[in-house]
Image (spheres, rainbow, N blue to C red):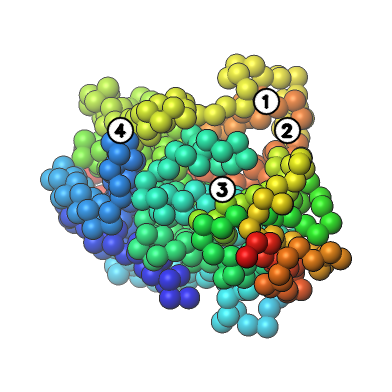
């Protein structure tokens, strides 16, 4: 049998664990079902603003072949967001040569876009086509510049 | 979906490869032995992968598993645990203790389940995993080695060449087996390693704290790490393996049989996992190697004990820094400026920022309850000094690191909850270490003479 002192200490630990678990349940995102995985691994994380980039890059991996060069940027350039988009592209477009619109928060000048085989633009469809459109989603577009 | 399942299932090979290493730990529960074996195998595998890269051998999955198994068999001849005189198996509990133990088990399971649900919802994925750990592992898997070439591209400088290799090696191993990086599956390592901790920790603490206190402490650790992991987005990054290794090593070292050289070696291998997972693992290991022999009166050969704890780290990090030097990339960790160039005047601001970002139910409660648990522990306090001393060392190291930046408020904002999270298991282990001796069942005949 355990002493009263040990039981009090144990009870405090269990009370703490119960409160922590309860708070964790309260902090879970409200979803229709937990039987289905989220669309991307970051849908409800602190990086959820990058979920459209994750989706577009994942879909782009189906149409941009390994070995190709691909320029990645936003339709409306933004050096900070372009920097993070480049980092996501390095992750999600393996075996491709990713040409960034910006690195370290600074736009790359001159833009490497003319040297790319493919162009990926996050955001609205650009007013001027960048080649042959391969993919158009609500998140952005992918173009083939060279045959 | 299929490659994701294979990616995660690939870690089952570590259970098999690690089994021979822990065959001598028969007094531990099967779950504890299985987790310890897999943890040892993972450290050995990662070290082999670094050594292969160092000498220019390309990674080959069957060969890597074979050399890991051979090393595991060799370690099995060295590792054995002592008897657990204080251990009281859950099956022998009755009455209120039985209910408390059942509650602890259910709360541990609930803590793991909440972490799993947050991963399913994509609510705890680390941005660093997508931008840092994952891409490195993916390139290493494709090139079948730690590819130094990617670190020479200035636009990829954010990949931190010198960062220790454990996570990227293990992720590359799983990626080679699965055929591709499975981004979603990799985030599941957070609840899976939390489950491993929930399975192994009570069995280790049972030798130093009476049941059900041991299981209650484990429930507090598991739920606390789970909540901080959700709030601070740690899924997929190095935090969860770091916390697993740190917690297992500390739970081993507060046991009475940690006076045995073989247990010190086992803890040393886990500490090598700590040091090769994240940069802040190294001060943890150094503090442990110094404080353990200094604080334990029953450990003969203090220097040998310190060496057993540090030698595996010297091997793993030695291989890593040799690789860095050979490839011309690094000779030590990247720092935040000159080591001793700090701004002491901003200390009050640093302390205020840490308090600011850890204030709130989600961040504070996982630290607060282990602190209360510690305050309620019975005397003597000496067994608690090791985890408390290491916790104090870590706090001093983190605050010292923050003092290198004149305006670290934002840095503290995105890092404090993660890097201070080892305090959760350290406080909880300090709260129960050595308390079995003050329990009624530990004061019977034969104990008084000890």
10 Å crowding of disc 3: few (<14), some (14-19), many (20+): many
Relative image position of residue B388 (x, y in whole percent)? 49, 35
Chain to which mark 1 belongs: B
Q: Are marks 3 and 1 on the same chain?
A: yes
Which mark is first along the chain, 1 or 3? Answer: 3
Residue at screen point 43% across, 71% down: B3
Secondary structure at badge 3 equals helix
Q: Are marks 2 and 3 on the same chain?
A: yes
Examine the rendered structure and indicate whether residue B88 appears above or below residue B256.
Answer: below
Relative image position of residue B450 (x, y in whole percent)? 23, 37
Q: Are marks 4 and 3 on the same chain?
A: yes
- Which residue is identified by label 4? B315
- Which residue is identified by label 2? B408
**Marks 4 and 2, how far apart in space?**
34 Å
- Which residue is identified by label 1? B403
Give the quarter of the image for residue B311.
Answer: top left
Relative image position of residue B165 (x, y in whole percent)? 42, 42
Secondary structure at badge 4 equals helix
């Amino acid at each position: 049998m355990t002493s009263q002192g040990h039981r009090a200490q144990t009870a405090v630990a269990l009370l703490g664990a119960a409160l922590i678990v309860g708070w964790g349940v309260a902090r879970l995102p409200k979803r229709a079902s937990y039987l289905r995985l989220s669309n991307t691994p970051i849908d409800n994380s602190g990086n959820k603003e990058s979920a459209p980039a994750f989706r577009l890059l994942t879909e782009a991996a189906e149409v941009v072949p390994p070995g190709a060069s691909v320029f990645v940027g936003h339709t409306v350039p933004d050096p900070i967001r372009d920097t993070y988009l480049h980092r996501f592209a390095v992750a999600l477009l393996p075996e491709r040569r990713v040409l960034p619109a910006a690195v370290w928060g600074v736009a790359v000048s001159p833009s490497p876009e003319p040297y790319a085989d493919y162009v990926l633009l996050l955001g609205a469809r650009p007013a001027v086509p960048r080649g042959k459109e391969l993919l158009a989603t609500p998140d952005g577009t992918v173009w083939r510049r060279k045959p | 979906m299929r490659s994701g399942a294979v990616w995660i299932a690939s870690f089952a090979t570590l259970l098999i490869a690690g089994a021979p290493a822990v065959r001598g730990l028969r007094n531990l529960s099967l779950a504890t032995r299985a987790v310890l074996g897999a943890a040892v195998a993972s450290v050995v595998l990662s070290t082999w992968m670094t050594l292969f890269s160092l000498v220019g051998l390309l990674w080959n999955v069957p060969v890597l598993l074979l050399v890991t198994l051979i090393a595991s068999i060799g370690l099995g001849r060295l590792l054995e645990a002592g008897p657990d005189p204080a251990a009281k198996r859950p099956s022998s509990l009755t009455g209120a203790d039985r209910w408390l133990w059942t509650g602890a088990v259910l709360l541990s399971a609930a803590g793991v389940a909440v972490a799993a649900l947050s991963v399913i919802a994509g609510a705890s994925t680390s941005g660093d995993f997508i931008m840092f750990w994952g891409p490195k592992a993916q390139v290493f898997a494709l090139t079948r080695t730690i590819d130094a070439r990617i670190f020479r591209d200035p636009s990829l400088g954010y990949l931190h060449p010198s960062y220790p290799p454990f996570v990227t090696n293990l992720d590359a191993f799983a990626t080679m087996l699965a055929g591709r990086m499975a981004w979603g599956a990799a985030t599941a390592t957070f609840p899976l390693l939390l489950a491993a901790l929930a399975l192994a920790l009570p069995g280790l603490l049972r030798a130093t704290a009476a049941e059900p206190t041991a299981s209650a402490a484990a429930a507090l650790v598991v739920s606390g790490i789970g909540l901080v992991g959700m709030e601070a987005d740690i899924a997929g990054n190095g935090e969860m393996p770091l916390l697993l290794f740190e917690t297992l090593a500390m739970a081993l070292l507060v046991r009475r049989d940690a006076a045995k050289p073989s247990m010190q070696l086992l803890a040393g291998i886990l500490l090598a996992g700590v040091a090769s997972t994240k940069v802040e693992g190294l001060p943890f290991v150094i503090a442990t190697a110094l404080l353990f022999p200094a604080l334990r009166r029953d450990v003969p050969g203090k220097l040998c004990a310190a060496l057993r704890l540090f030698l595996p780290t010297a091997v793993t990090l030695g291989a890593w820094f040799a690789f860095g030097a050979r490839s011309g990339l690094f000779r030590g960790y990247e720092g935040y400026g000159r080591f001793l160039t700090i701004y002491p005047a901003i200390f009050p601001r640093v302390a205020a920022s840490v308090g600011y970002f850890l204030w709130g139910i989600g961040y504070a409660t996982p630290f607060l309850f282990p602190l209360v648990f510690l305050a309620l522990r019975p005397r003597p306090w000496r067994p608690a000094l090791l985890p408390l001393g290491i916790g104090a060392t870590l706090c001093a190291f983190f605050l010292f690191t923050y003092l290198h930046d004149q305006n670290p408020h934002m840095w503290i904002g995105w890092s404090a909850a993660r890097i201070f999270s080892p305090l959760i298991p350290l406080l909880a282990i300090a709260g129960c270490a050595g308390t079995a001796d003050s329990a009624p069942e530990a004061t019977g005949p034969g104990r008084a003479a000890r």
